[in-house]
Image: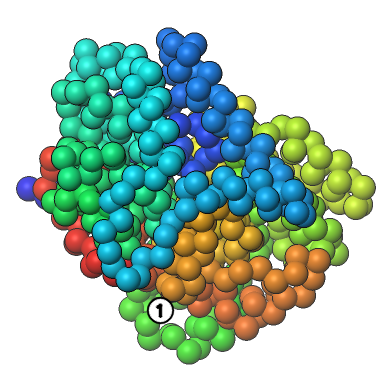
Amino acid sequence: MPANHTHERKITKDAYVIDVNMGYGHSRPAHCLTDISGGKVISANDYPGIPEKDKKMWRDSRQAYETISRLKPIPIIGDLAFGAMDRIQKIHSFYPRRDLSRPNLQLLQIYHWLKQGLGRHLIAQLSRDPKPIVTTFFVPAFFAEDNDYPGDIYCITTDADISRTWAPLHPKKSRIKYIASNGRVKERLQLYGVKENQIYLTGFPLPKELVGGYPDNQLRALLNDRMCNLDPRGIFHERYDDLLKAKFGSDTCHRRSIKRPLTLLYMLGGAGAQKQLALNIMQSLKAKIKRHEIRLIIVPGTRHDIAEIFTQEAKALGLKKELGEWLVIPTFSSRAAYFKGFNKLLMQTDIIWTKPSEMSFYTALGFPIIMSEPIGSQEKFNRVWLRYLGGGMSMENPKYTNEWLFDWVNSGGLARMAWSGYIEAPTHGTYRIEDLVLGRESEIHPLPLIV
C-alpha cells in the first residue's frame, strides 16, 4: 500500500540523521527529517563523547570559515580572503559536459584527515546498532564508507549545484547513495563519477508543518493567504483567476480583507554575516513600520549578541513601541529551538530576504525570495537556479527598500514569484526521502530531471 503522508509527526527510530553544526545550511534540512530518527539529529562535529582531537579539527575548520565569511563585506581584504577560500571549493562550469572525477585539493585534505582517524569514533558508536545513515554533509558519509559502516549510507545535497568535494575519492567504487536536491545536482554527480543508480532525485527536504503532507493542504492554505498580501491591487489575481481557482477553489483572494499585515522576514546566516544589510533595511522601512504598513522580522538565529545590536538600533530609530509586534527580533535558546521557532515564523511570513543559501529551496513553499549578494560559489549557482524558476530576484539598493519593495508588491510581481516557486520547485522532498530510506512504496510522483 502507498505510504500515508500526513503532517502528523510519527516519531520512529529507523535511521540516524547526521548534520554538522557549521552555520545552518546542513542543519536545517536535517531537522526536517527527525521523524525517522526518534526526533534526534547527531552533529558529527559536536556529539557526546567526541574525541578532543576530532573536535579540534572541526572547530578549526568552522572558525576559519566563519571568520572569512564575516570579512566578506570588507572591501579588498574580504574579497581576497574569501576569494582564496572559494577557489578551493569552486564549482566549475557545467558545460561542456566532461569527466570531472579528478579530486580537488579540498577532497584530498579531507581524506588525509580520515587517515588520521577523523570520524572513526562516531562510526564505531553507530555501528553498535546499525541503521541507515542519512547525512546532510558529505564528510560524515565519507567517514561511514571509509570505516566500513555496516548499514546504508545516504548523503543529501543541500545546494542547487555542488563542487567535486561532495563525491568521494573513488566515486565509481563508492556505495554512498546520493539524494539530489534538483536535476542539475544529479547530472553533476554523474560528471564526478558517481554511478547513476546511486543517485535519487527527491528534491530538498522542507518542514512538514509547512507542507502538510501529500496532498499539500496546509501549504495551499498558507499560500492562499500570502497571495492576498502580495497582490493588494489584485493585478496577479485578475490575470490568473481561472488558474488560481483551479488550485485553491472558490476561496481565492478577490481583494477580501487581509487577515494579517504584509510581513517581510530577513535572515542572517549562521556566521552572522550581512549584519549591516539588516540595519539598512530597518532604517529604510522605519516610517512604514511606524504606520503599520509592513511588519519586519529580523532573524539572527541563536546570536543573542547580534539580536541586542538590532534591538538597540531599533530604539535609536524611534521604533521602541513597534518592537515585538511590528518589528520582531526573535532570539532562541538553542539550535533545535531556532529551527522549530523559525518554521512558526514562516507561517506568518510573506517575503523572505536572504542570501541565496539553502533557503533558496523554500521558494517551493510559495515564498518570493529577495536575494542579497551570494557568499561562495554554491550560492551563485543557487541564485541562477532561483532566477531560472522565477522564484526570486536580486535585491535593489537596500537604502531604498521602502520604495522598490512596495513597487514589487503593488505590481503583483512578488505574487508572481511566489506562484512560480510553488509551481516549479519540488515541494515534497522530505516525504520522498523518508520513503526511500525506510524502503516504503511512495505515492508521490517522481520528479522530472529538469528540477
Residue 43: horizontal and vertical position, in percent?
43, 26
Q: Is residue 171 above or below residue 231?
A: above
Residue 181 placement: quadrant:
bottom left
In the image: residue 31, left or right of residue 155: right
Residue 224, position as x, y percentages in the image: 47, 68
Say which residue appears at 84% left-offset and 58% top-offset: 283
Residue 443 in view of the camera: yes
Q: Nearer the viewer, residue 62 or 351?
A: 62
Q: Is residue 415 above or below residue 208?
A: below
Image coords of residue 44 (percent x, y): 41, 25
Residue projecting furthest to the left? 1
Name the residue at the bottom extreme: 239
Left or right? Give the position of 250 relative to 350. Answer: left
Residue 366 visible within the image: no
The quarter of the picture where residue 62 lies is top right
Q: How is the image coloured?
A: rainbow
Q: How many marks?
A: 1
Describe the element under mark 1 as helix, strand or loop: helix
10 Å crowding of disc 1: few (<14), some (14-19), many (20+):
many
| Quadrant location, the C terminus | bottom left
Q: Residue at x 20, y 57 (%)?
A: 444
Which amino acid type is shown beneath numbered disc 1?
Leu
Residue at the image position 20 percent from the left and 23 percent from the top: 149
Residue in view at x 50 percent, y 18 percent:
55
Q: Which residue is mark 1?
A: 244
